[in-house]
Amino acid sequence: MIHRSPRFSDRSILVCQGLCCQKDGSEKLLKAFKSQITSDTKIIPAGCLGKCEKSPIVLTLPRKITYKRVSLEDVSRICNALS
């Protein structure tokens, strides 16, 4: 499925789905974000975000905050930070 690129004014969470991030559990993170987030925030599976050495990576918009080495325990904290 192809997603349009988010505008920087959109409230979005991009979860890297590059090979390194997938190896480190990003598919589970994507599901966890989808189960916890409100409908006004887009959850987007992203291509490689270029920080493979610190995978898995999550980028939040519009503030452009990058989270590195994200675990399932971090998902709630990241969701709360968007509020």
Image (cartoon, grey):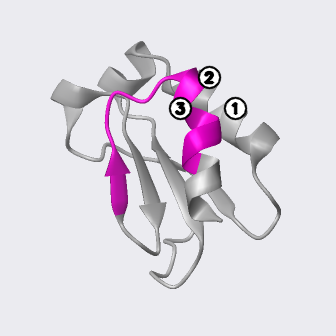
Q: Residue at x 31, y 27 (%)?
A: 55
Q: Helix, strand or loop at disc 1?
A: helix
Q: Is residue 64 above or below residue 28?
A: below
Q: Is residue 53 above or below residue 16?
A: above
Q: Residue at x 34, y 27 (%)?
A: 69
Q: Is residue 22 visible?
A: yes
Front label number (3 vs 2): 3
The residue wearing badge 1 is: 32
Q: Residues within 10 Å of mark 2 (few under 14, many from 20)?
A: few
Q: Which residues are magenta?
A: 65-78
Kindly indicate the quadrant of the structure image that contains residue 65.
Answer: bottom left
Q: Residue at x 49, y 18 (%)?
A: 25
Residue 3 x, y percent position in the rendering = 59, 62
Q: Calculate the distance from the C-alpha at mark 3 to the C-alpha at mark 2.
A: 12 Å
Question: Which of the labelled discs sits on residue 74, or is there none?
Answer: 3
Q: Helix, strand or loop at disc 3?
A: helix
Q: Residues within 10 Å of mark 3 (few under 14, many from 20)?
A: few
| Amino acid type at image mark 2 | Lys
Q: Helix, strand or loop at disc 2?
A: helix
Q: Residue furthest top?
A: 23
Q: Nearer the viewer, residue 66 or 49?
A: 66
The residue wearing badge 2 is: 28
Which badge, 1 or 3, comes first in the chain's sequence?
1
Front label number (1 vs 3): 3
Q: Calculate the distance from the C-alpha at mark 1 to the C-alpha at mark 2.
A: 6 Å
Q: Is residue 3 visible?
A: no
